[in-house]
Image (tube, helix red, strand yellow):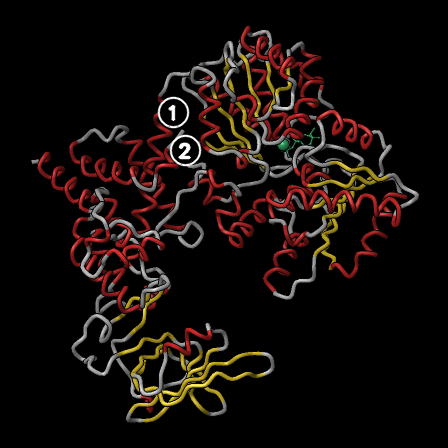
């Protein structure tokens, strides 16, 4: 019985892979157009949901239109005009039916398209909110659709007399044709969809059958509430969203389970080194640091590999926690690798850790790609023989040729700059070592549940005592002189300052020129009495170290820097930061940057110089930096404004392409799906029961498709 059912499901899933060309109405030409929208297979079409819906259950007479309601009318075009009013073009159309006339206006439009497509005398449908203007009713930017004279609105039950889907149109395919194609695809193939999500879970969240959900998400039934569809709260859409999240979370849960059930090292929690380190530190660990360390020790002690994310706001003291963890592994006779995304950060880590490590007798080395071949072979040798305990470096650590004697723990700093692949590669350098990943800035909860969803999470939610928030102010470009004045005052009081230029990867050279030119200008024209230094990522390692040393020793008052200083630089006396082109940075990045001046207990200031921005959104965005110092809140705002792709900044970040779900908009559904998927795996770790065969078949199908990236590692 069960076997038969699974076979049917598998057949159906295979059907979903049918090329879109086999859907009625799609020839080779249309197939090519659809491909531009990512629709190659039938399944892609089923998940290509409408961007909006129009209520055409009722076509109103123009005379019956009411103000401030969404309504649909049908009539003939009586008048068309493109005019110009104060620099701005305006497209006007008057439409009439037997009861009266109404004007439609477009303030932004594609001129040739609008003019060529519409002719006087044509029949047309307009749909949108009706406004009152000079006592007359108007549509502004309504949706429109041409209708031929032959079309009988009362007989066509696809485009009229129903809630109609509006799709995002690819060039070269009109709404109506697209709608017909989608209808055909749904009619013929929606039944091939099956979810496999256990019945009790579907019950709990009031989910529909997947096929029914797809059908209604495209073509809502007559009784459906269109507002729920527009806000994506309908049962049909929520079913699809839940389903998409569920399978992502299920694969994360399985991955987590497979990691934690593997055999790994069980470290004895000795405190030989860590106690000695504690005595050397000029401060006590905060409560949060101690708690997190306990969590890490628990993992390291367990016979399964650690797989943990360490989160904390900038300056919360993640590094020292990481070092403590490293020392436990070393105490047990194992090696540790700490991998950072940039050379400058790796160097910074190395010099900082090495002081302590040396005093403890822990042998440490730096490994980056700019180290000479000759030195490298010596280092490789030391790593292979086990003579070196702690390797700090960049991705050079995971290159071929680097063989560890006994790698017990891998630590990845600033994980968001690496992809999931690098995490896996580091792991492969040992026999199932423990892995601890750290993030530079807090990760919003939704991302923690997706991109990092297979990791256990520790949060340092407390800053070392006495850290005052960085006083932050936004200055528009026109007040640059004032900004320089403040810097001068602060330096004369004994502080040092950073002036930071954005470094956008593609335009690295341009920015470098900016920073270099600016350093010269500041030295010669603005601060002739002070010493200006310059540091950027293209400099040789030793030159960078020299500049940093000069800055530390106060031979430099103002350090002009590209964003290489974003991470890891520690100069206690530098309490002023100016960020140029602040409007070009993400909020989390700005927060991370200003963290560089929140190192001591002195009051620190951060001045954000930005091009004056007209639009309120960008202004509000920068104001958040003035308002709050809470990295978690800033991260949430940043994510909401820029979206997950840009927030994470790397293509390989491991965030899957969602087809219907949106982690920001649907965060509540994400939590539910995660809870259920993880519960299910906890109770039935291998999904071995026959009743889960369907679920496994669907999971496999999904993983062959979009989930791929999320399941590596
Ligand atoms: P981040 O979490 O941003 O990586 P770091 O680990 O670089 O933070 O720590 C920031 C600074 O705070 C460092 O100078 C570090 O020595 C110091 N620090 C860390 N823990 C404490 C503590 N418990 N008390 C006081 N200072 C601390
Ligand atoms: Mg750090």
Element assignment for label 2: loop
- Considering only order in the chain, which callout, 2 or 1, is on the residue closer to the N terminus? 1
Mark 1 sits near ligand 2, with its Cβ under 8 Å away: no
Check disc 2 and report the residue beneath it: 454
Q: CA distance from mark 1 to mark 2?
A: 9 Å
Image position of 657 with respect to 687: above or below? below
Q: Position of residue 266 (x, y in %)?
A: 45, 14
Callout 1–callout 2 Cβ contact below 8 Å = yes
Q: Which label sits on residue 64? A: none
Work out which quarter of the rendered image holds the N terminus and state it: top left
Q: Position of residue 697 (x, y in %)?
A: 21, 37
**Which is nearer the eye, 329 or 549?**
549
Check disc 1 and report the residue beneath it: 259
**Which is nearer the eye, 101 or 262?**
101
Identify the image quadrant of residue 56. bottom left
Image position of 520 with respect to 116: above or below? above
The answer to whether residue 50 shows anywhere in this view is: yes
Identify the image quadrant of residue 353. top right
Q: How many marks?
A: 2
Identify the image quadrant of residue 263. top left
Left or right: 207, with 618 as reference point: left
Q: Position of residue 148 (x, y in %)?
A: 24, 80
Pointer 2 local density, CA inside 10 Å: few below 14, some 14–19, many at least 20? many
Q: Which residue is drawn at the image coordinates 43% and 18% (left, top)?
A: 432
**Which is nearer the eye, 10 or 229?**
10
Q: Which residue is drawn at the image coordinates 23% and 65% (left, top)?
A: 180
Image position of 62 with respect to 680: above or below? below
Ligand 2: give its quadrant.
top right
């Amino acid at each position: 019985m069960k076997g038969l059912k699974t076979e049917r499901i598998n057949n159906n899933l295979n059907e979903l892979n049918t090329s879109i060309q086999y859907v009625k109405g799609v020839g080779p030409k249309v197939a090519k157009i659809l491909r531009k929208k990512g629709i190659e297979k039938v399944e892609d079409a089923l998940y290509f949901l409408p961007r909006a819906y129009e209520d055409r259950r009722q076509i109103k007479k123009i005379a019956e239109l009411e103000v401030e309601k969404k309504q649909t009318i049908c009539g003939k075009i009586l008048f068309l005009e493109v005019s110009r009013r104060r620099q701005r073009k305006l497209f006007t159309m008057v439409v009439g039916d037997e009861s009266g006339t109404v004007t439609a206006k477009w303030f932004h439009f594609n001129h040739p398209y609008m003019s060529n497509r519409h002719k006087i005398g044509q029949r047309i449908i307009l749909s949108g909110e009706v406004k009152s203007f000079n006592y007359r009713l108007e549509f502004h930017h309504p949706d429109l659709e041409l209708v031929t004279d032959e079309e009988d609105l009362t007989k066509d039950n696809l485009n009229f007399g129903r809630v109609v889907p509006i799709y995002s149109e690819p060039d070269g395919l009109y709404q109506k044709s697209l709608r017909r194609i989608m209808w055909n695809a749904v009619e013929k193939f929606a039944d091939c969809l099956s979810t496999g999500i256990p019945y009790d879970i579907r019950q709990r969240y009031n989910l529909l059958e997947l096929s029914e959900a797809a059908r209604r998400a495209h073509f809502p039934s007559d009784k459906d509430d269109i507002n729920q569809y527009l806000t994506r709260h309908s049962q049909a859409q929520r079913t699809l969203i839940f389903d998409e999240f569920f399978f992502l979370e299920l694969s994360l849960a399985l991955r987590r389970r497979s990691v934690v059930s593997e055999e790994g090292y069980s470290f004895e929690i000795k405190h030989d080194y860590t106690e000695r380190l504690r005595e050397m530190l000029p401060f006590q660990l905060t409560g949060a640091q101690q708690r997190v360390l306990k969590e890490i020790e628990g993992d390291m002690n367990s016979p399964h590999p650690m797989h943990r994310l360490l989160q904390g706001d900038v300056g919360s003291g993640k590094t020292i926690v990481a070092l403590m963890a490293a020392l436990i592994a070393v105490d047990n006779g194992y090696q540790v690798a700490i991998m950072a995304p940039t050379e400058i950060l790796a160097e910074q880590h190395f010099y900082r850790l090495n002081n302590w490590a040396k005093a403890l007798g822990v042998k440490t080395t730096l490994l980056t790609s700019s180290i000479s071949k000759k030195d490298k072979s010596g280092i490789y040798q030391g790593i292979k023989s086990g003579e070196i305990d702690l390797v700090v470096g960049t991705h050079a650590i995971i290159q071929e040729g680097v063989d560890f004697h006994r790698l017990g723990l891998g630590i990845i700093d600033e994980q968001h700059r690496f992809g999931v692949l690098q995490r896996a590669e580091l792991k492969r350098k040992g026999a199932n070592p423990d892995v601890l990943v750290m993030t530079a800035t807090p990760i919003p909860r939704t991302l923690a549940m997706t991109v990092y969803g297979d990791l256990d999470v520790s949060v340092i939610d407390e800053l070392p005592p006495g850290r005052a928030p960085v006083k932050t102010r936004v200055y528009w470009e026109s007040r640059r002189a004032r900004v320089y004045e403040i810097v001068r005052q602060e330096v004369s009081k004994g502080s040092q300052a950073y002036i930071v230029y954005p470094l956008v990867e593609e335009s690295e050279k341009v920015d470098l020129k900016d920073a270099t030119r600016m350093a010269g200008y500041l030295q010669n024209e603005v601060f002739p009495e002070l010493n200006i230094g310059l540091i950027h990522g293209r400099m040789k390692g030793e030159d960078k170290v020299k500049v940093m040393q000069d800055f530390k020793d106060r031979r430099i008052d103002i350090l002009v820097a590209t964003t290489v200083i974003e991470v890891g630089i520690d100069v206690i006396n530098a309490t002023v930061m100016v960020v140029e082109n602040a409007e070009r940075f993400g909020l989390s990045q700005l927060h991370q940057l200003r963290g560089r001046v929140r190192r001591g207990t002195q009051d620190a200031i951060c001045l954000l110089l930005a091009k004056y921005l007209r639009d309120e959104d960008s202004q509000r965005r920068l104001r958040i930096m003035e308002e709050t110092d809470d990295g978690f809140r800033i991260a949430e705002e940043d994510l909401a404004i820029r979206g997950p792709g840009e927030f994470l900044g790397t293509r390989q970040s491991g965030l899957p392409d969602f087809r219907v779900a949106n982690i920001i908009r649907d965060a509540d559904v994400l939590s539910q799906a995660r809870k259920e998927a993880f519960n299910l795996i906890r109770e039935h770790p291998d999904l071995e029961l026959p009743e889960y065969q369907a679920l496994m078949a669907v999971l496999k199908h999904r993983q062959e498709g979009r989930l791929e990236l999320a399941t590596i590692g």
